[in-house]
Amino acid sequence: MERFDRYLIALVLAHFIATLVHATAHFALQIVPDGIDLLFIVGVIWIGPLVALVILRFNPPLAAGLLAVLMGAAFVYGLVSHFLVAGPDNVAFVGSQSWTVLFVGTAFLLGVLEVSCLLLAIIGFWAAARTPSEPAARAG
């Protein structure tokens, strides 16, 4: 396993753990997503990156491309819902409770992890795409 793989795996697992902690804060604050939001969160933010890690073993360029799309979508979703659009999910509108600090902190942490994973995935995909006649080049 190469260093690039280890970094991607570490970022995706840290992201997954942060989403679980953030979800705990959501439920404690009684901010429960439903409908299309819940489908997006479960499919794109939780399951998708874990599936990409499985693909990483067999097809690194595909996994990197998939991770770039998923993390980019997760970042935009989190930015809009947590920071831009007024609503119960916005960090500025969450009441002052014991779970508020965890909610706000993990919202910020998720953004940092998503951008980090997005950038690393783009680098990995770009490195593989630059050498089409050779075996997939791997960053790191």
Image (cartoon, rainbow, N blue to C red):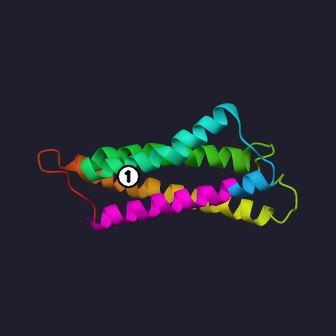
Up-down: is 94 above or below 87? below
Left or right for 69, reference 130: right
Prevailing SS of the magenta stretch: helix
Of residues 67 and 133, the one nearer the viewer is 67
Q: Is residue 66 left or right of residue 57?
A: right
Residue 11 magenta: yes
Other residues around mark 1 within 10 Å, as few (<14) / some (14–19) / many (≥20): many
Task: Judge whether 33 appears above or below 20 on screen.
Answer: above
The answer to whether residue 25 is visible is yes
**Amino acid bearing label 1:** Leu
* Residue at 49% across, 48% down: 71
Q: Identify the residue at image location x=49%, y=45%.
A: 47
Reading the image, the residue beneath label 1 is 53
Quarter occupied by residue 123:
bottom left
The furthest residue to the left: 133
Residue nearer the viewer, 96 or 127:
96
Quarter in which the N terminus is drawn: bottom left
